[in-house]
Image (cartoon, helix red, strand yellow):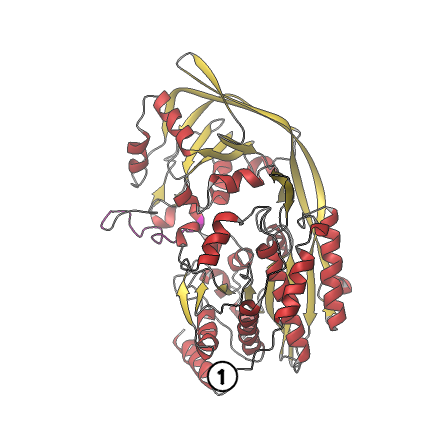
Amino acid sequence: MTQHRILLAAVLALLTAVPALAQQADAARLNEHVRVLASDEFEGRGVATPGEQRTVDYVVGQFRALGLEPGGSDGSWVQTAQLGRTRQSGPATITVSAGGASRALARGPDILVSSDRPVDRITVNDAEVVFAGYGVSAPERGWDDFKGMDLRGKILLVIVNDPDFGAPEGHPVAGRFDGNAMTFYGRWTYKFQEAARQGAAGVLVIHDTAGAGYGWSVLEGSSTAPKFDIVRANPDAERVPAQGWIQGPVAAQLFADAGLDYAALRAAARTPEFAPVTLTGVRMSIDFGQTADRIESRNILARIPGATHPDETVLYGAHWDAYGRATPVGDDDIYNGAVDNATGVAGLIELARLFKAGSPPDRSVVFAAWTAEEAGLLGAEYYAANPVWPLETTVANINMDSFLPGAEISPQIVVMGAGKSETDAWLERRATEQGRTLIPDPAPQAGGYYRSDHFPLAKMGVPALFGFAGFTGHNAASRDYVANRYHKPSDEWTSDWVMDGAAVDVDLLYLVGRDLADSRAWPEWNPGAEFEAARQASAAARE
C-alpha cells in the first residue's frame, strides 16, 4: 500500500506539468440538450413509456453523430435491463385497531404503501405492530436491533437514518455509524431489505424531514409513479409484502395507543442494548391492489476505444430517467427532471464530444446513460451484475447527477463520500487549477453517497468519484431548487436558463477523466472504506 501511494504521488506530480486546458465545454450545447430532454414531449422520461424511446433515440443519435462506437454487447448502443414493475390499482384500505376501536389511515397524507412483490393484490390482516428501532443489523459495528425476536408476519416501524444521526457530542453512540454522514444502514432501501430478511409482513419507515433529507411532499408526490425492481429469483424472500413510510405524528399516535412514550423509545433505540418493542393492543391491516408485470428498459452505452490499453476503462455515468407522469401538482403531471437529471445526460454528451475532439485516450472511455435511477439505481445495479466492460479493469466511475443552471461558477465543489477513495486527489489537483476548493457533503445525513448510480458499482469495488458544484448548502439557487423543484413537476427548463457554470464543471470532469485515461495509475479505496475489500479481491486483474 505504501508503494502504491508513492506511485500515486509521483503520477500526480508529473501531471502538474500538464497545463489545464482552456474552457472547451459549450454552454449553449449543454443548454440545448437539457431543453430537448426536459421538454414535455419527452413526458418526464419515464421508464417503459414513450418518453424512454424518445430519450434513447435522442441520446444514441447524439453519440452516433459524434462518431463514438456502440458500447453495448454485440455492437449495440444499449444494454437491455430486465425489470419488474408494479403500479397502484385502485384505493388502499389501511386500518389501525386499538382499545376496541378502529380507524382508517389515508394513503398519501398519513401513510404510503407499495410492494415490489410481483402480485396483483397485497393483503396483511390484523398484524401485530413492532417498533424495531432503526431496523439495523450490523455485526461489524456491534449493532443488532432485532435481538433474535421472531418478526414473521409482523409490521415493523423503524426510524429513518442511522442510530447516531443527530446524536449530541459525547453521547455513547456518537460516531458509531459515521456521525451525521448517513451509511447504507440509514437508507430506506436497506431497511426494506432487512425487514424481508427478518420475515416481516410489512415495514414502515417513520418519516422526519431532518432524518430523511426531504419533506413528506417529495415522497407523496412521486408515490403514484410505477415502482421498479430488478427481476429476482425469489422475490418473497427478498421483499416484504407491504413497504413504505408513515408520517412522524401518525406513528407517534400508534405508540400512544399502546401506552408507550415514542420519544423515550427513540432515545432507547440509540443504544446497542435496545430490543424490539411490541405495540401491545395495536393491530394494523393493509389491503391494496396493484398491477405487476415485467418490462425491459435500457442503459445507453457509447465508447471511445483506448489507443494503447483498450481493455482498461474509465467510465462516466448519468441517469436519463425522471418520474414520467405522476401525481399532478396543480394541472401539471409531467415530472420533467430538467436539473435531475437532464443536466447530467447533457454533460455526458458534451464530455463525449470533448473526448472525441481530442487525441485518442490511452485507455478506453465509456459513456453510460443509466435507466431507472429514480426507481432505486436499477440500471446501474443491472450493469454491476452484468457488466459489459469488466469491473476489475474499470479504472474509476465518474458520476454526474445534476448541474445547477446559471452563470455563477461556484468556488466550491462538493465531494460526495469525501475521503473514501483516491479519486479525490485527482479531482482536487484540477479543481485547484480552476481556483476552486473541495468540500465534503454539506448534508451527509441525507445519505446522498448511497443514492446515486455510482453506488452499485462501488459495492463491486469500482472506485467512484461523485463531485459537483453549486449544491453547497450556502447557495440560494440550490436551496430554492431543493425546496421547490426537486422531484416535482416544477423541475423544468425555462427560456432564461444558461449553463455557463455547468460548462466549467464539465471541463473539470473532462480533465480528471482524461488524466485517468492517459495514466497507468489505478486509484484505490482508502483504508477502511467499505468497498476496499471488494476491490482488493480483483487486484490480480490489474497487475
For image coordinates 32% across by 36% down, the residue present is 266
Q: Magenta stretch mostly in which secondary structure? A: loop
- Report the span colored magenta: 170-184
Task: Compare residues 40 and 518 and report the one nearer the observer.
Answer: 40
Is 245 situated above or below 447? above
Instruction: Tell me which residue sits at (63%, 53%) in the image.
Output: 379
Q: Foreground residue, 347 or 27?
A: 27
Residue at the far front: name it: 496
CA neighbours of label 1 inside 10 A, class few (<14), some (14 to 19), many (20+): some
Eyeballing the image, is 273 above or below 173?
above
| Residue 367 in picture, x, y percent from top left | 65, 66
Figure quadrant of residue 497:
bottom right
- Amino acid found under the numbered disc labelled 1: Leu
Q: Residue at point 57% right, 46% down? A: 488
Q: Is residue 206 above or below residue 409?
A: above
Identify whether 429 is placed above or below 492: below
In the image as oriented, which residue stretches furthest toward the bottom?
17
Q: Quadrant of the C terminus?
A: bottom right
- The percent position of residue 437, horizontal first and vertical second, equals 41, 71
Residue 464 is a magenta residue = no
Quadrant position of the N terminus in the picture: bottom left
Q: Is residue 187 visible?
A: yes
- Which residue occupies the extreme left position in the image? 170
From the viewer's perspective, tell me whether residue 389 is left or right of residue 256.
right
Label 1, on which residue? Answer: 15
Horizontal side of residue 53 vs 149, given as left or right = right
